Image (cartoon, helix red, strand yellow):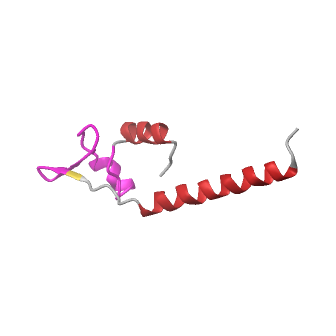
């Protein structure tokens, strides 16, 4: 059985790691859109994202690539 001190230390460590991860995420530079012949394209696959940017103006990936990105890094944007 773990002592209360060990549990408190684990909680403190988790809180510090979470704060660091959030800070790192907030400080990341944003991705720049890929524009080919005046058409906004996915930065991963190169497909047009013009329909997607109507709903999400800052999008830089198509829906499929964005889902793969989020699954790979465990993120949601």
- Residue 67 in the image: x percent, y percent? 44, 39
Number of numbered labels in the structure image? 0
Q: Is residue 12 left or right of residue 43?
A: right
**In the shown orientation, is residue 46 left or right of residue 77?**
left
- Picture residue at 42% right of the left edge, 36% below the top: 68
Report the side of 38 relative to 13 (left or right): left
Name which residue lies at 86% across and 51% down: 4
Residue at figure coordinates x 80%, y 49% from the top left:
7
Q: Is residue 64 left or right of residue 45?
A: right
- Identify the residue shown where x is 32% and y is 50%: 60
Which of the image's four quarters has the N terminus? top right
The quadrant holding residue 47 is top left
25 or 57: nearer the viewer: 25
Picture layout, residue 57 above or below residue 1: below
Q: Position of residue 35 (x, y in %)?
A: 18, 52
Q: Which residues are magenta?
A: 35-61
Q: Position of residue 20 (x, y in %)?
A: 55, 58
- The residue furthest left is 37
| 58 lies above or below 46 | below
- Let me know if residue 8 is in the magenta part: no
Front residue (pair 26, 35)? 26
């Amino acid at each position: 059985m773990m002592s209360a001190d060990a549990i408190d230390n684990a909680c403190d460590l988790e809180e510090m790691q979470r704060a660091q991860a959030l800070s790192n995420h907030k400080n990341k530079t944003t991705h720049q859109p890929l524009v080919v012949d005046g058409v906004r394209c996915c930065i991963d696959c190169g497909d047009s994202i013009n329909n997607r940017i109507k709903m999400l103006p800052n999008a830089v990936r198509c829906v499929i690539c964005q889902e793969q990105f989020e699954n790979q890094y465990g993120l949601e944007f």
